Amino acid sequence: MGFDSIATAILMSAVVLTAAYVLMTGNSYLAEETLESYREYTHASLQRLQSKVQILAVNYEGTVLIAYLKNVGSTKFEDFSSFDVIVYGKTESGTYVSDYLKANFEIVKELINPGIFDPQETARCSVSISLPEGNYSLLICTPNAICSSFEFYVGG
């Protein structure tokens, strides 16, 4: 065995060890990222399970729609900017209506934490919309896609 054979064996061993190290490091990083993604998914799922809202009443007068919404889950909502409000239904003439609305929310039954929509608190949602006579549904959804709907009638 010559020096070149020994040098080649040492070089090949170094290459194999380097490749093994790179594979082990990549697998460790991949496992760590997968675990972190799983944690985030689990946290989001738990937030959804703990969230629940209920529309208590809807009043429509003139061009103003007012709804009362109660947080019956255990999730606190910092603000209402990510809440979705949708009105859909069918007029008496047979036309279908579907509107995504920008609503104003105000907490009317504040228990704790001023300005935060805590569990068991009630908020008022007001929207300006012109609806012809017919049957409609109001759908209000939280930022984590938990929704409540309420059917109402607009008459003459």
Image (cartoon, rainbow, N blue to C red):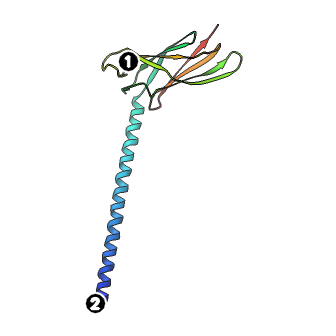
| 2 or 1: tag closer to the N-terminus | 2
Residue farthest bottom in this picture: 1
**As drawn, 19 above or below 127:** below
Amino acid beneath label 1: Glu
Outermost residue toward the right in this view? 93
Q: Quadrant of the N terminus?
A: bottom left
Residue 34's spot in the image, x, y percent? 38, 51
Residue drawn at x 69%, y 15% is 92
Q: For residue 132, which numbered disc appears in the image?
A: none
Q: In what element is the residue under mark 2?
A: helix
Q: Quadrant of residue 21?
A: bottom left
Which residue sits at x=63%, y=16%? 135
List x then y, in percent, for residue 141: 48, 27
Q: As drawn, is 109 to the left or to the right of 129?
A: left
Q: Amino acid under label 2? A: Phe
Q: Please give left or right for residue 107 compared with residue 154 in the image.
A: left
Task: Please provide percent x and percent y for residue 109.
Answer: 37, 13
SS at mark 1 in the image: loop
Residue drawn at x 65%, y 20% is: 90
User: To which residue does mark 1 refer?
Assistant: 121
| Mark 2, residue position | 3
Q: Quadrant of the C terminus?
A: top right
- Label 2 to label 1, Cα distance in Å? 82 Å
